[in-house]
Image: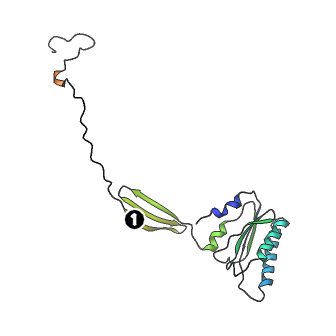
């Protein structure tokens, strides 16, 4: 899951309002339901200590949610009287929720989405590789890849350009400890 879209939330210090608001199915009372939901979320933020400007911004954003454009709702992140980020939800939240905290509360974005964070683990050696998908519930095999033996270039013909003139058999014995060779050594 690519979470780069959350970057704007960490550019400003807190506190933050984090709201998860679902959209009701279209009905005759949809406007009234949205107003009640907006009032309830705003009231919850006030009780947690949020400033009025941020509560008003969240209230407006919740009232403007439309089931035709946001079928499951939105996550709203507000700071200093404005909504900074409002990504759509992949699934409706169980209930509208609001949090006022020093940092934005982004973890619930993973819950309604129904996705487990997944990573690929590769076990690689010279014979090939084995891949595994890992997520919250555990890992599952994603299949192997067989390796190939790399072709090596033939070893170049390395012959010395100069051959030694003296062979080891023809080398005279060296004197021991700086003296001359003893009789019978040679």
Q: Quadrant of residue 80?
A: bottom right
Quadrant the C terminus occupies: top left
Residue 61 on image: x %, y %: 77, 73
Q: Quadrant of residue 62?
A: bottom right
State how the image is colored.
Answer: rainbow
Residue 8 shows in this picture: yes
Q: Quadrant of residue 109?
A: bottom right
The residue at 79%/65% (across/down) is: 82
Q: Is residue 67 left or right of residue 36?
A: left
Residue 61 to residue 79: above or below = below
The residue at 72%/83% (across/down) is: 24
Q: Is residue 103 left or right of residue 157?
A: right
Element type where label 1 sits in the image: strand
- Outermost residue on the right side: it is 52
User: What count of labels does the image hold?
Assistant: 1
- Outermost residue on the bottom side: it is 28
Residue 47 shows in this picture: no
The residue at 63%/62% (across/down) is: 4
Residue 19 on image: x %, y %: 73, 70
Q: Is residue 109 left or right of residue 156?
A: right
Within 10 angstroms of label 1, few (less than 14), some, or many (20 or more) residues? some
Quadrant the N terminus occupies: bottom right
Q: Nearer the viewer, residue 102 or 68?
A: 68
Q: Is residue 153 left or right of residue 32?
A: left
Q: Nearer the viewer, residue 89 or 135?
A: 89
Q: Which residue is mark 1?
A: 144
The residue at 59%/74% (across/down) is: 114
Residue 131 on image: x %, y %: 44, 63
Residue 34 to residue 143: above or below = below
């Amino acid at each position: 899951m690519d979470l780069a879209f959350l970057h704007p939330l960490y550019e400003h210090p807190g506190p933050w309002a984090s709201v998860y608001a679902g959209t009701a199915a279209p009905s005759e009372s949809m406007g009234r339901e949205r107003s009640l939901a907006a009032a309830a979320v705003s009231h919850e933020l006030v009780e947690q200590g949020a400033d009025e400007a941020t509560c008003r911004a969240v209230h407006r954003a919740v009232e403007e949610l439309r089931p035709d454009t946001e079928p499951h709702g939105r996550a709203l992140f507000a700071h200093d009287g404005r909504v900074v980020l409002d990504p759509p939800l992949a699934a409706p939240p169980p209930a509208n929720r609001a949090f006022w905290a020093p940092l934005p509360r982004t973890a619930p974005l993973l819950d309604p989405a129904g996705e487990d964070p997944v990573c690929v683990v590769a076990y690689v050696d010279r014979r090939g590789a084995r891949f595994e998908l890992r997520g919250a519930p555990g890992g599952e095999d994603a299949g192997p890849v067989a390796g190939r033996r790399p072709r090596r270039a033939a070893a170049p013909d390395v012959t010395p350009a100069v051959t030694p003139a003296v062979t080891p058999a023809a080398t005279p014995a060296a004197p021991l400890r700086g003296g001359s060779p003893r009789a019978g050594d040679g």
